[in-house]
Image (cartoon, coloured by chain):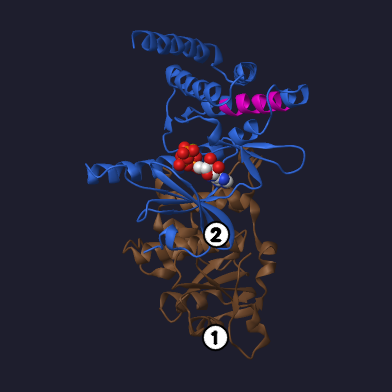
Chain colours: A blue, B brown
Amino acid sequence: MATKPSDLSEVDLIQQGAEARVYSGHFAGEPCIIKERFKKTYRHPTLEERLTQRRIQQEAKALLRCRKAGIAVPSVYFIDSTNNCIYLEKIEPSLTVREFIQQLPLPYSDEDNNKLYAIALKIGSVLASLHNTDTIHGDLTTSNMLLKFPHDAFELYLIDFGLSQVSQLHEDKGVDLYVLEKAFLSTHPKTEHVFEEILKSYQKNNKKAVEVLKKLDEVRLRGRKRVMVG
Amino acid sequence: MTIYRQSKSDMAQEDHIKTFPMDVFPHSTISVAMFKDVRKIDELKTHIVGGEIDAAIVSSRMICDLFQILVAANKAVNAKTTGKLKTRNINSEVVFCLSPSNSITDSLKKFGVSPEDSAVIAVTVDDFDGQKMQVVLQHINGEMVPLEQLHRYTDEDTVKKVYKINDVELQKSSLLDSVVTRIAVKEFAM
Ligand SMILES: Nc1ncnc2c1ncn2[C@@H]1O[C@H](COP(=O)(O)OP(=O)(O)OP(=O)(O)O)[C@@H](O)[C@H]1O
Ligand SMILES: [Mg+2]
């Protein structure tokens, strides 16, 4: 049986969440990220075990699907089904989009706004490609996007596909964007102009953008109504 | 990078055998050696089939990096330690794990050695005293070369074809990253 990540030598726990622990370590000499999923509660052990397994499989499938479509995602090194772990290429040096935006002081200077627009352009086109291949991410947030800085250029990686699914429905794509909008604007105050750029870039690059953005509008309206009704 | 131990030996050639500890299976090791100008592949195959050779012997055309072998070997050891071997033994499992296909016959045919091969790679698992590789040396009619030369023998077009990797994907990924991902996720890919 494979060693549990917590028992591996030279690993660092980099994030402890409610459903997963994320470690930084090595796999066959290469730096890697190890994501260990665990059950939330023990009320339905067999059911939850199956759900945990499903999420790892969904993550693996989506990473392959995206990679085939030319979307930048980490490569996969190993799936340890005994310990519910997935071993991924470590994207480095990198920052999450969240970390990148949060380090910029408010109000944004013109220079910082230009950086934000460049990233927005990239996010929009990556999400457009993602949806062009009928992949729904399921948990789009600025923590689930990594910026890799080789020189002065940057590459945008999508990560954290445990809630992903395959769907052609404009509605599902609209909800995906809605989840990001909510997360984006609540995590990063005063970035409405940046989010607008994401949508513009999405529109330019997605085949069904008109239909998807129409659904986004409907979902927004529903969201607001739900809040009003309480 | 990877830490490796060299096998104990008084023959200079054997410095080319490299042994790698595994992070996830600390009690296991993988040893790898590469040979060029290999002749009499048919004889070699009888020794593999006959079971005298306790090693996986693979065609180097399909291998683009040592890391590809380590990823597949790790997967094979995982199958063994969890009682989930899909093939006869750990050696055939290493060959099977290298392949993106879930068909055993197809995998062994494409990744095992064939008479057209002249460069081959031998992989042994848990060869703690180096004996398994010694037996390989006795039966292989070829010259051992350093693993650094591995890339010279890769047939990239065949690798792309067998692993079904297209140019769109390679805009954002190295061939090696695409290959190891397919190896790692193959049972979930369909
Ligand atoms: N492949 C990778 N390369 C570099 N860093 C990574 C990689 N994967 C994850 N990380 C880092 O670990 C964090 C958590 O990873 P991930 O989002 O996959 O797990 P999570 O438990 O769902 O996290 P969250 O609680 O943010 O949703 C990321 O925000 C990122 O900082
Ligand atoms: Mg996350």
Q: CA distance from mark 1 to mark 2?
A: 35 Å
Q: Quadrant of the C terminus of chain A?
A: top left
User: Which residue: 60% across, 81% down?
Assistant: B141
Residue under the image location 53 percent in, 60 percent down: A27
User: Residue B173's image quarter?
Assistant: top right
Residues drawn in magenta: A115-127
**Residue B90: quarter of image:** bottom left
Please state which amino acid type lies under the numbered disc 1: Gln
Kindly identify the residue that appears in the image at 38 percent across and 51 percent down.
Answer: A84
Mark 2 surroundings: few (<14), some (14-19) or many (≥20) residues within 10 A:
many
Dot label at residue A83: none
Given the image, on which type of amino acid does mark 2 rest? Answer: His
Q: Give the structural element (helix, strand or loop) at label 1.
A: helix
Q: Nearer the viewer, mark 1 or mark 2?
A: 2
Residue B163 in magenta stretch: no
Is label 1 on the same chain as label 2?
no
Seen in the image, is A42 located left or right of residue B113? left
Viewer can see residue A160:
no
Which quadrant of the figure has residue B104?
bottom left
Q: Position of residue B133 (x, y in %)?
A: 52, 81
| Marks 1,2: beta carbons within 8 A | no
Question: Residue under circle 1?
Answer: B138
**Residue A104, percent from left and from top:** 68, 30
Name the one closer to the observer, A133 or B60: A133
Per the image, the residue denoted by label 2 is A26
